Image: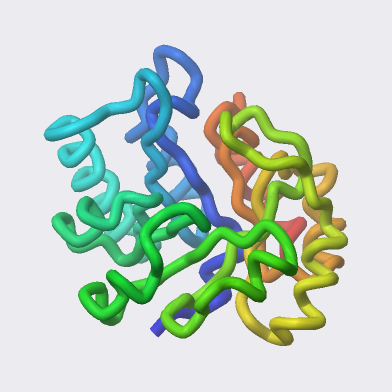
Amino acid sequence: MFDKRNLKLYFICGTQDIIEGESIIDVVTEALEAGITLFQFREKGKNALVGDDKIMLAKQLLSLCHQYDVPFIVNDDVSLAKDIDADGVHVGQNDLEVNKFAQQFENKIIGLSVGDVDEYQNSDLKYVDYIGVGPMFATSSKDDASLPVGPEMITQLRDYVNDYPIVAIGGINLDNAPAIIQAGADGVSIISAIAQSQNITESVRHFLQTVE
């Protein structure tokens, strides 16, 4: 059963996100030890791992997350999520329709990206456990990111979704995270503010204090 408290501090990371020369295993381990509540494996970009290398890393990270009782989510790649028995999958508006794979992905977490009210109204949320809303602010972590919608989009969507789980994403840092929580998000999704932090433990702990 999905618990929306898992969204509190949702770390998203792939090899493309970490500082050159660092190990993604080390980065994720430190983040887990510091207290992240959910992890998403997002391996994308021109230098991203593919094939067996991607599968091998995904399995390592899955095992690592389970050592800390943190759910492991795969971004977009439904077949990978099924093959390694991940805890869930997160898909975008342009990916496979949720209802086409949800029944083959029973008892798993399913997240869906929603950019605005129109996308929400056109989304089938029958099998969706949470929506990821954004980008909140300008971000360099995603080459295909849309224009920022700001925390006010969280507030607007709350009028439609009531208590439905919402996590915010896009350009979030320690300075702007409080405004997102105040707007009504259940948590924040972080990429570079953790992956490229000079002190991951300290960054994670500060985010956790911010979203309490």
Residue in front for this viewpoint, 149 or 38: 149
Examine the rendering and report whether any part of residue 145 can be seen: yes
Examine the image and state in which quarter residue 194 appears: top right
Q: Residue at x 83, y 52 (%)?
A: 150
Q: Residue at x 26, y 52 (%)?
A: 62
Q: Is residue 97 above or below residue 35?
A: below
- Extreme residue toward the top, this view: 21
Q: Residue at x 21, y 55 (%)?
A: 79
Q: Position of residue 115 (x, y in %)?
A: 67, 57
Q: Classify residue 81 as left or right of residue 121.
A: left
Task: Name the image quarter holding the N terminus.
Answer: bottom left
Work out whether residue 54 or residue 37 is closer to the camera in this orientation and state it.
54
Q: Residue at x 14, y 56 (%)?
A: 83
Which of 129/186 is in front? Answer: 129
> Measured along the vertical axis of the image, is residue 175 above or below residue 182?
above
- Residue 151, position in %: x, y? 83, 57
Q: Position of residue 107 (x, y in %)?
A: 29, 81
Is any atom of residue 26 visible in this view? no
Residue 158 sits in quarter: bottom right
How far from the left and from the top, in percent, is residue 117? 74, 68
Tell me the quarter of the image containing the C terminus: bottom right
